[in-house]
């Protein structure tokens, strides 16, 4: 099974080694949800991904959303809206 080591947006912190198949499924669901909503809270993002993948995904969807979200931030594909509480996310221009 192919694996990917995720990135972490904070200097000095490292990502984790996860299944490429699970990474790709979560990544696609996150990016689609952000594209559909423009901006979305982290809580709503997790619920959207769960709705999209429930029944087809084995493992903790919330854990994978957190892990892949951090990776996408580190790669510059999504960003946290500065000063937002609760945390809001959007695509990078």
Image (tube, grey):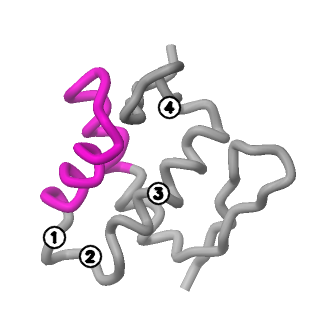
Is residue 27 toward the left or the right of residue 40 in the image?
right
Pointer 3 residue:
66
* Residue on which the image places disc 1: 54
Residue furthest to the front in view is 85
**Mark 4 element type:** strand
| Residue shown at 43% from the left, 60% from the top | 24
- Earlier sequence position, callout 3 versus callout 1: 1
Q: Earlier in the sequence, mark 4 or mark 2?
A: 2
Q: Which residues are magenta?
A: 28-52
The crowding category of the residue bearing disc 3, from other C-alpha atoms within 10 Å (few below 14, some 14 to 19, many at least 20), is some
Mark found first going from the N terminus, 4 or 3: 3
Image coords of residue 18 (percent x, y):
57, 74
Would you say the residues marked 2 and 1 are in contact, meaning their CB atoms lie under 8 Å apart? yes
The answer to whether marks 4 and 3 mark residues whose Cβ atoms lie closer than 8 Å is no
Is 46 a magenta residue? yes
Report the residue marked by disc 4: 78
Give the alpha-carbon distance from disc 3 to disc 1, as whole Å. Answer: 16 Å
Please state, as top left, top right, bottom left or bottom right, where the N terminus lies in the image. bottom right
Mark nearer the viewer, 2 or 3: 3
Alpha carbon distance from label 4 to label 3:
13 Å
The residue wearing badge 2 is: 57
> What count of labels does the image hold?
4
């Amino acid at each position: 099974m192919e694996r990917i080591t995720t990135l972490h947006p904070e200097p000095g912190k490292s990502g984790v080694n996860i299944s490429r198949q699970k990474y790709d499924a979560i990544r696609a669901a996150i990016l689609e949800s952000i594209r559909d909503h423009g901006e979305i809270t982290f809580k709503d993002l997790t619920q959207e991904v769960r709705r999209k993948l429930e029944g087809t995904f084995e493992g903790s969807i919330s854990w994978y959303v957190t892990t892949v979200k951090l990776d996408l931030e580190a790669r510059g594909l999504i960003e946290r809206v500065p000063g937002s509480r609760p945390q809001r996310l959007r695509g990078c221009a």
